[in-house]
């Protein structure tokens, strides 16, 4: 909480609902009359909007709904891939449904070992709360064929984090089977020069 008032005064702040009462504010050493104080949210405080009242010397002022407490992780309703399986060198599209305004990323390193950083999953401009990202699995991935898990992380504006997973089957080029159709024979003819 930051407020300005008469320099050299005693300053406190309170948060409605008995969240904080007469918490001490400290005057800035570089800006006279500017006071600041902090409060650490505890688990017993319910999510919601709270009013803040600041008292500097004999004067006080209140701001309605100035503090929003949010300790609830965003709900990830769904995480899907448009492909159940793919080969290295191919791409897939991830779609995530979660809280609007969140930061969403996907860890695809199990599929593509060349992508060590999480992939950003962008929110749709038309449909809030819907996020998507196209992911290209590099031909150079060293991941072996098999079921892989993509881990999606959603972080809301308050910093709460939720994760969810989607499974995708990967087949690498080195695991491709050579199939010779019936009726086709291979003949080895020695050559001499």
Image: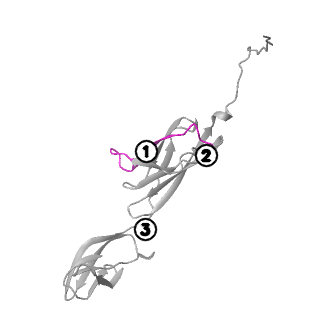
> Quadrant where the C terminus lies?
top right
Q: Which mark is residue 71?
A: 3
Q: Residue 140: within the magenta?
A: yes
Residue 67, x across and y down, in percent: 31, 71
Task: Report whether 146 appears left or right of 132.
Answer: right
Residue 174 visible in the current orientation? yes
Earlier-in-chain disc, 1 versus 3 = 3
Q: CA distance from mark 1 to mark 2?
A: 19 Å
Earlier-in-chain disc, 2 versus 3 = 3
Note whether 108 is above or below 91 in the view shown: below
Q: Residue 127: within the magenta?
A: yes
Q: CA distance from mark 1 to mark 3?
A: 25 Å
Task: Report whether 149 appears left or right of 160.
Answer: right
- Disc 3, SS: loop
Q: What range of the chain is rendered magenta?
A: 123-142
Q: Residue at x 61, y 46 (%)?
A: 148
Q: Residue at x 72, y 21 (%)?
A: 180
The foreground one among 173 and 121 is 173
Front tag of 1 and 3: 1
- Mark 2, residue position: 148
- Mark 1, residue position: 132
- Dividing the picture into quadrants, the one containing residue 10 is bottom left
Earlier-in-chain disc, 1 versus 2 = 1
Residue 85, x across and y down, in percent: 58, 37
Residue 108, x across and y down, in percent: 54, 47
Q: CA distance from mark 2 to mark 3?
A: 31 Å
């Amino acid at each position: 909480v930051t407020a300005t008032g008469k320099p050299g005064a005693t300053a406190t702040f309170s948060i409605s609902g008995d969240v904080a009462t007469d918490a001490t504010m400290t005057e800035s050493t570089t800006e006279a009359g500017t006071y600041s104080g902090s409060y650490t949210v505890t688990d017993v405080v319910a999510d919601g909007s709270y009013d803040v009242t600041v008292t500097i010397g004999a004067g006080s002022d209140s701001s309605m709904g100035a503090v929003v407490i949010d300790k609830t992780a965003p709900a990830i309703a769904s995480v899907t891939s448009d492909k159940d399986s793919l080969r290295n060198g191919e791409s897939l599209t991830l779609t995530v449904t979660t809280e609007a305004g969140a930061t969403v990323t996907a860890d695809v390193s199990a599929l593509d070992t060349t992508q060590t950083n999480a992939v950003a999953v962008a929110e749709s401009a038309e449909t809030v709360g819907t996020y998507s990202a196209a992911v290209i699995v590099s031909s150079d991935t060293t991941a072996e064929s098999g079921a892989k898990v993509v881990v999606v992380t959603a972080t809301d504006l308050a910093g709460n984090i939720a994760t969810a997973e989607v499974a995708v089957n990967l087949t690498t080029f080195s695991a491709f089977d050579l199939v010779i159709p019936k009726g086709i024979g291979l003949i080895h003819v020695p050559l001499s020069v």
